[in-house]
Amino acid sequence: MKHFITTADWSQQALQEMLDLAKKFKQGEKSNALKNKSVALLFFNPSLRTRTSFELGTWQMGGHAVVLEPGKSAWPLDFEFGSTMDGIAEEHVIEAARVLSRFCDLICIRAFPKFENWQEDRQDKVIKTFAKYASVPVINMETITHPCQELAHMQTIQEQLGVAKNKKYLLTWTYHPKPLNTAVANSSLLISTKFGMDVTLLCPNENYLLDQRYMQLAKENAEENGGSFQVTHNIEEAYEGAEIVYAKSWGALPYFGNWEPEKQIRDQYKHFIVNEEKMAMTNNAKFSHCLPLRRNIKATDAVMDADYCIAIDEAENRLHAQKAMMEHLIKQ
């Protein structure tokens, strides 16, 4: 049994098989792979696209989705081992994972970092503990990576550019008034390098580099798959010749959990916004974002409303890619 927690655990070939099936689903092919099966969707954090696409995808494949919100519509859970449960948690993840495995055929988890201590959060304890005690496949609906977004992103790239290998890919940091999760940025590096793209990470300075684990995986992926990976802090250099521009905001890891000092630094970089002038430097690039996006903060109205913006296509592809991934897992 294999889980879908990070694409780092999956080969390019296996991911491409999912993408090929996702393409068929988008073209209208039907599947009853989840007929008479159930999928547990546990949301520790809010969702629009993820919840909608998983619920609809499960239904379209003949299954039933059970949505649970631990601490709201379900008991709050404890994830510490050997703990004396005298706090707010009423149930331990050990029992929750085992019980849900008796009821459901897949368990999906959305659990963002607590944004207090990166050394703690980077362990991805919530979903890994579920995976340890579940006896059915566990799916990552976003924790410190977002592999479902990765699949939809690559599906969209292949639709727009054909073969992704050696296409020039830019992941650019953008300003946001709040320090956001690095999950989508981590995943952007993983999937683009996994498919051999020539990848550039643009960020204001070294404080905004991503976790070294994902930087290293990006380098290894690039070497293995015939692409390249580089980092720059120069906007003009990064945009020149790009064929895909992917924007995301994230907080500076050295200030993780101590955001006030970081805000003073971050506020200097509002000019990293994606606008028409920057897009004009590219090689007729497509622009995308995982959504939600704050207009005229991360990207201008002109960019979001341009023909080259493919963010809505990527959002739609969440449905098709996740259906393909669930079918792959349920048939393994």
Image: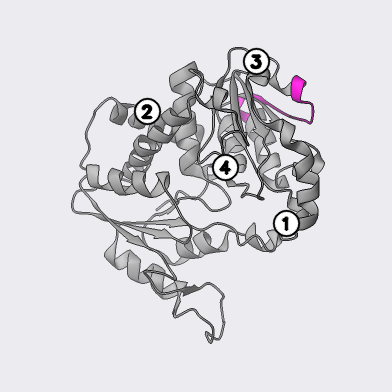
Circles 1 and 3: CB atoms closer than 8 Å: no
Residue 2 lies in the magenta-colored region: no
Residue 174: give x, y in percent of width and height. Answer: 67, 36
Q: Which mark is residue 282?
A: 3
Element class at badge 4: helix
Tell me how far mark 1 sits from mark 4, CA to CA: 17 Å
Q: The residue under label 3 is which amino acid type?
A: Thr
- Seen in the picture, residue 6 relative to 317 is either above or below; the reply is below
User: Helix or strand or loop: what does disc 3 sit on?
Assistant: loop
On screen, 235 above or below 128?
A: above
The kind of residue on which mark 4 rests is Val
Quadrant of res 216? top right
Q: Which mark is residue 256?
A: 1
Which dot, 4 or 2, sits closer to the camera?
4
Q: CA distance from mark 1 to mark 3?
A: 33 Å
Look at discs 2 and 1 and give the one toward the viewer. Answer: 1
- Within 10 Å of disc 3 (Cα), the crowding (few <14, some 14-19, many 20+) is many
Q: Is residue 329 visible?
A: no
Q: How many marks?
A: 4
Residue 225 among magenta residues: yes
Q: Locate residue 160 relative to residue 51 in the image: left or right.
A: right
Q: Is residue 285 left or right of residue 273?
A: left
Q: Position of residue 123 (x, y in %)?
A: 62, 59
Dot 1 or dot 4: first in sequence order is 4
Magenta stretch bounds: 224-236
Q: Which residue is mark 4?
A: 184
Q: Quadrant of residue 97?
A: bottom left
Front residue of this view, candidates 331 and 151: 151
Q: Secondary structure at mark 2?
A: helix
Image coordinates for residue 209, horizontal then vertical, percent? 74, 42
Separation of residues labelled 2 and 1 (CA atoms): 38 Å
